[in-house]
Amino acid sequence: MSVVSADPPDTPDVPVVKRGRVQLPRSPKLLIGLGILVAFLLLAIIGPLIAPFNPSSSLTTTNGVPQAPSAAHWLGTTQVQQDVLSQLLVGGRSTIVVAFVAGAIAAVLSIAIGVTSGYLGGLADDLLSMLANIFLVMPALPLLIVIFGFLPPSGGTNDLLIGLIIAFTGWAWGARVLRAQTLSLRGRDYVVSAQIIGERTWRIIGWEIVPNLLPIIASSFLFTVLYGVGTYTALAFLGLVNTEHWSWGAIMFWAQASSAQVSGYWWWYIPAGLAVALLGTSLALLNFGIDEFINPRLRAAGLTRRRARQAGQARPPKRFVLGLTPVVRAASSDGKPL
Amino acid sequence: MQSRAAGNRRAAPMRMILRKLVFYLVTAFAAVTVDFFIPHAMPGNPVEAVLARMQGNVTQATIKSLELSYGIGGHQNILIQYLHFWQKLLHGNLGISTSSYPASVTSVISGALPWTLGLVGTATLISFALGTLLGVLVAWRRGTWLDNLLPVTTFFQAAPYFFIAFLALQLFSSSLGWFPSVGAYTQGTEFPGWNGAYIVDVLHHAVLPAVTIVVCSAAGWIVGTRNVMLTTMDEDYVLIAQAKGLSRRRVIWYAARNAVLPSVSGFSLAVGFVVSGALLTEIVFSYPGLGWILLQAVGNRDYPLLQGIFLIITFAVLAANLIADCVYIFLDPRIRQEA
């Protein structure tokens, strides 16, 4: 890990290296993002258990007219009297499982391909980069639509399989970023010295390079989870995943199929859409937090005058001037976290 | 010697473009190959696989169009079928649509393509221009209220396009009645020709879908440009420009020109996402473009049409990529030097 810099004073924003462990900056973005994400993860675990109704059981007592929210149905009903709240609670698990499975598999793929191609260089690098670039420019959603179109019907209810297929189209961005960073690490002294000592290639990659890529890996993992949420929701919205397999996208599929957006049945689609957007926002906020951790300039840019004063700048500039990022002493004293 | 070097420098952009072109051709080749092999990777031959998925809703016309699309019964050697697939593709033959037999996939797609190109093309360009400008502005005015724009853009970036479309439709069409909710023009009338009233009608119908696409996709450009701009503003040449006493506007211009470059190169990566989101937006507004026929194809299990749409979208995205790359090579002299 990087060298401990001259001990920064009492500012909380600084990633301090203590006994080889990196302390993440406690920025509000990171905390809010983490809070929302944890709430959603809890929802994924207990959601199906606390759902008040069976999300699929249907009645036709209201002649196909969706009912607005009431005491019995907090988020109203669909046109066949299904409880929207129950659908939301049950559908959360599938959505989150698919997204995280996709993120995890894509992270493994992108590390394997990106770091390998960056470290090895030469022909292997050319071929692997080419592969990543092809996957990067090929539009993913249309490709997934064709794949899911031909999937046997039983495949449409298997969250792990869905996550795997989404990961297959989502690893390339991470691989490209990791490759670029590996290229810059490859020539560093500690890597060269490991090579001179005679460490095996895989040990150097696994023990010298990958640990230093952790912030980037975390960032690309979150990015892929975000991609997984959006993609899975889009596929379900199109009706390509089994539409009785509840997810937030499936709720919106049924709302769209019944023209809820034209008829004004807002309670049917707004909760599901908001859930997707909030989950995505929390992931993006976490990602911003990591970005600021990697790039101190972005962090200083977020300083308001009040916080700048707190951080010890005696006379904060009235307005931040071009070319003069007010890098707070503490914020600048951390070395590169990598 | 000198003249030869100069000649090389002039030829360098062409060589870069050629290299990009070769890459996109390889990608297109990969897309076509994937498109061919996905149906063949499923159990049985493609016709059987498709028939199994249709669960009994099969007419004689469907079987006929499937056989025409995938070769008779799919009994031939797979390599020969693959070559046939290429041969048909190069003649512009993408098979026969099962849901609108005997119409060819090409004719179904070409009916929808102009709407999508017009809507999505315009919206994407507007969003790129607007997002980049806003990004520069937010970075320039950092520490002011404009920073509050960032959480808002984060939300729009994370929300699915079709959800924002739902909201736009509910608010501006159902509740306020400002804009029509369905289609690309007023239904039920004969095509009156491109007169003024018709054009106004088409534009009126396009406003909500276009605004949805712009709002959702601009968020990415804003954040991206802002971050690069913040880094650029710390460069020495910007400091020097300021120290020389150039006007603020002039300095911003110097910094912004360089900050926009990564956005242009990032355009090629983002365009696939934007197009995908735009197709979903079309569905919500029942806009008769590719997204709408895509939904029909999924609903009717029209596999030849699905595959055709995939190829057309991929080719369109690759073409947009190539154009963005050419613009980038034109804008950034460093790239031309490296070649």
Image (tube, grey):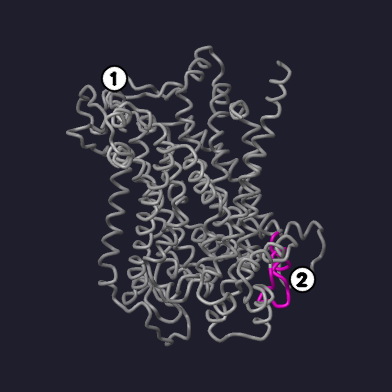
Pointer 2: residues within 10 angstroms few (<14), some, or many (20+)? Answer: few
Q: Residue A235: horizontal and vertical position, in percent? A: 48, 65
Q: Residue B322: horizontal and vertical position, in percent? A: 64, 44
Q: Gap between marks 2 and 1, in whole Å?
A: 71 Å
Q: Which residues are magenta?
A: B95-113
- Amino acid under disc 2: Thr
Residue of label 2: B189
Relative placement, left or right, of A47 versus B126 is left
Relative placement, left or right, of A153 versus B58 is left
Please tell me the numbered disc located at residue A314: 1
Q: Residue A52: horizontal and vertical position, in percent? A: 29, 76
B102 in the magenta segment: yes
Q: Which is nearer the eye, A299 or A212?
A: A212
Above or below residue A244? Residue B196 is above
Residue in the picture at 61% in, 48% down:
B124
Relative placement, left or right, of B176 versus A299 is right
| Residue A214 appears in the figure | no
Q: Residue B141: horizontal and vertical position, in percent? A: 47, 31
Pointer 1: residues within 10 angstroms few (<14), some, or many (20+)? Answer: few
- Amino acid under disc 1: Ala
Residue in the picture at 67% in, 86% down:
B60
| Residue B262 appears in the figure | yes
Q: Which chain letter goes with mark 1?
A: A
Above or below residue B161? Residue A211 is above
> What kind of element bears circle 1?
loop
Residue in the picture at 32% in, 33% down:
A338
Q: Which is nearer the eye, B337 or A21?
A: B337
